[in-house]
Amino acid sequence: MNRKLLLSIGAVVVSIILISVVVISADKLLGGDRDNVILIDFDTGLAAAHVKELVQWGPRMTGSEAERNGAEYIAAAFTEVGLSNVDIEGFYVPMFSVEKAKLSIVEYYPLKNVPKPLGRTETFKHIEEFVLQGYSGSYRWNSFRDDLDVVNIGNGTDESAYGRTNGRICFIEQTADTPRNSVVHDLAYRAGARAIILQNVYRNEELGFLPMFKTNQYKEDTDSAREIPFMMVSKACGDRILEATSANFKVRMDIDVLIQDRCVNVVVGDLPGRTKDMVIFGAHYDTCYNTIGVVDNTVGPATLIEIARGMVSEGTPDKTIRFCTFAGEEEGLFGSINYFDAHKREFMKDLDLYINFDMAHVDPDTNSFTITTTDNSTISTLENIRDTLVRSEPALEKYEIEVVYNDMTWAASDHWAFVNGGYDAMGGWGSGCVEYHTYLDNLDHLNPESLQIGGRILGSYAYML
């Protein structure tokens, strides 16, 4: 056997050995070698402190001063923990703000032709008893001639019933079958209704069926959003309205909702890696206009800040890690959609994975947490990191932490733009709190311990890639 042949055989053998080592190492990272798991640092106390700082300005309704304060706080925190290229990008979209919201019932003479002098007037509490829905219209009250009668059309599924609401309030008892807000709005508008009252009769019985905020599709080619007030009322408030207006009362409302272009902010910061390949962590930081939104979703940006700090302390990762916090989520995913569209070319070259944090928190009264992934092959790795975390933090044994496949094609949070754009995604979803989208989503429900579940599992996964 000649020397050249021996050298060639030797080179092949060495190559096979090297390839085997790489494959085995990769298998250990992605499969089951628990010793290879790197858990990033995560201080739950610091995360909780960020939550408490962010809620100090009140509800962070997109376009408000409080939302802008939140953006500036997050940008400063990103800089402090060591991220680079920290910036606040702005996108202008039609956004609403509630300038005035008054609702009451007024006693009339039996024929309901004029109000009864010294008759009873009952006023309902905005936020606690009624909440306007996204892109509600306005209704300016000038005199008793603007008081309205009510027509109850059940749960709103019978489209023919809307015709009876012309010139009156369209009253709907919301059930699981009730059409979504945009459908109800269109049907009532076309029927000539003057306003919409949606009574909560099936959500959150334990809270007394509180009214909650939900958005409503804004249609730029119509003025319907400006003409029909749209609100949800509590069950008790709705029952009283139905009882009173079936006798000799009418509804009086004075609603001023301003719709104009406002800035949707996106706060961005990078942890540069050894390559330009990119993983993005995202969370919305805006809240509904009626709540400080501790669980939905102040815990999201607070968790991202702490993930960033933990990753920076571990050193330079292989992939570049980008952190984004979006406004405009509650009204229609405006922040993430506009940001994605603005950076499509960059993402086509570099983006590997998007990881979303929306209500990645466990209510103290429950114990479930779910991590979703659009890639089945990542489940065993995520489970491996989960198991390592629970062993290192025995206090987490009480939580049911599942890792499941999900295509994540539902347009319910900021992952949607990325999944719809063809990218893999993951998400951390806690059991949230039943108070979400109501004024009771406050600090009473904060469970700092639970923030490390999604924070460390998904943060560690991204760092280990």
Image: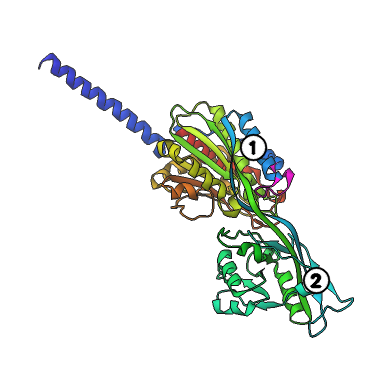
Which quadrant does the N terminus fall into? Answer: top left
Q: In this image, 439 relative to 460: left or right?
A: right
The amino acid marked with disc number 2 is Ser
Neighbor class of circle 1 (other Cα within 10 Å; few <14, some 14-19, many 20+) is: many
Percent x, y of residue 35: 45, 32
Viewer-side residue, 17 vs 314: 314
**Above or below: residue 257 compared with residue 15:** below
Which quadrant does the C terminus fall into? Answer: top left
Residue 257 highlighted magenta (yes or no)? no
> Which stretch did the figure color magenta?
54-64
Q: Are marks 1 and 2 in contact (CB under 8 Å)?
A: no
Q: Mark 2 points at which residue?
A: 143
The tag on residue 74 is 1
Neighbor class of circle 2 (other Cα within 10 Å; few <14, some 14-19, many 20+) is: few
Give the secondary structure at mark 2: loop
Give the secondary structure at mark 1: helix
Residue 41 in sight in this render: no
Foreground: disc 1 or disc 2 = 2
Viewer-side residue, 364 vs 418: 418
Q: In which quarter of the image is residue 221?
A: bottom right
The amino acid marked with disc number 1 is Ile
First-in-chain label (1 vs 2): 1
Q: Which residue is drawn at 38% across and 44% down?
A: 377
Percent x, y of residue 392: 55, 37
